[in-house]
Amino acid sequence: QRRSKSSLPDAREQTLVAVKPDGVQRRLVGQIIQRFEQRGFKLVGLKMLQVSEELLSEHYCQLRTKPFYPGLLRYMTSGPVVVMVWEGHNVVQMSRTMVGHTNPTEAQSGTIRGDFSIHISRNVVHASDSLEGAQREIQLWFQAKDLLDWDCCDRASTSEI
Ligand code: GDP
Ligand code: MG
């Protein structure tokens, strides 16, 4: 009789990560995906799109009054983005740590922004900043049907092989 193993708490926590247009143009998509995969998170949604100003104004609704907002819209519409949903224990907080400080000047080496960027206006990547923010952003960017639930090949029972 095998003992059943329970999952880590919050194993189904999800967050939204996006490679911004500069990240796509600089061919950083693969390296950014690799960091989340090798950390152990699970990719449950992925798409590439040219973002509309309408979607961005929802995504960045808290920044609409900032002086840099018009430039932020131009930046984020300057080419396609690759947007992803990653799942796993504590993924919201850990992805923020992996992404690093908003301002690359302050971002530590070893973080995505600390390794790949030098200026706040071109900081390569987005990650949701809270559980509530993640839920809001995932609903904004993805339809529920496009988030996939899947099991790892090493969990297949012998009857399936
Ligand atoms: P994030 O959650 O770390 O991405 O930071 P925020 O939510 O505060 O800001 C969203 C994005 O707006 C940042 O990632 C930057 O691309 C941009 N941004 C924030 N602050 C500034 C700023 O002072 N100047 C410029 N040019 N862009 C900024
Ligand atoms: Mg933010």
Image (cartoon, grey):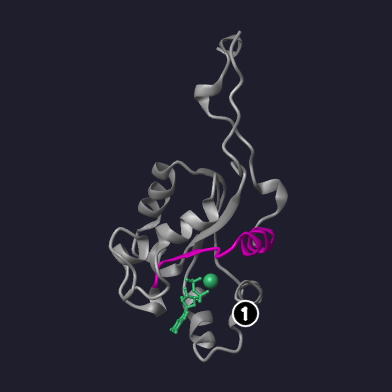
- Examine the rendered structure and indicate whether residue 150 appears above or below residue 140: above
Q: Quadrant of residue 51?
A: bottom right
> Residue at image x 43%, y 48%?
36
Q: Quadrant of the C terminus?
A: top right
Q: Residue furthest bottom?
A: 67
Q: How many marks?
A: 1
22 or 137: nearer the viewer: 137
x and y percent of residue 23 in the render?
A: 39, 64
Drawn side of residue 87 relative to residue 20, left or right: right
Q: Amino acid at mark 1?
A: Gln
Q: Residue furthest right?
A: 144
Say few, some or many: other residues with alpha carbon within 10 Å of mark 1 (under 14 / 14 to 19 / 20 or more): few
Q: Is residue 47 magenta?
A: no
x and y percent of residue 46 in the render?
A: 55, 51
x and y percent of residue 13 in the render?
A: 61, 48
> Residue at image x 32%, y 70%?
117
Is the distance from the Cβ of mark 1 to the nearest ligand 1 atom less than 8 Å?
yes
Q: Which residues are magenta?
A: 123-140
Drawn side of residue 118 relative to residue 83, left or right: left
11 or 74: nearer the viewer: 11
99 or 56: nearer the viewer: 99
Q: Quadrant of residue 129?
A: bottom right
- Examine the rendered structure and indicate whether residue 157 appears above or below residue 154: above
In the picture of the structure, the residue carrying the numbered disc 1 is: 62
> Residue at image x 64%, y 63%?
137
x and y percent of residue 98 in the render?
A: 41, 57
> Residue at image x 51%, y 25%?
153
- Examine the rendered structure and indicate whether residue 78 appears above or below residue 6: below
Secondary structure category for the residue under label 1: helix
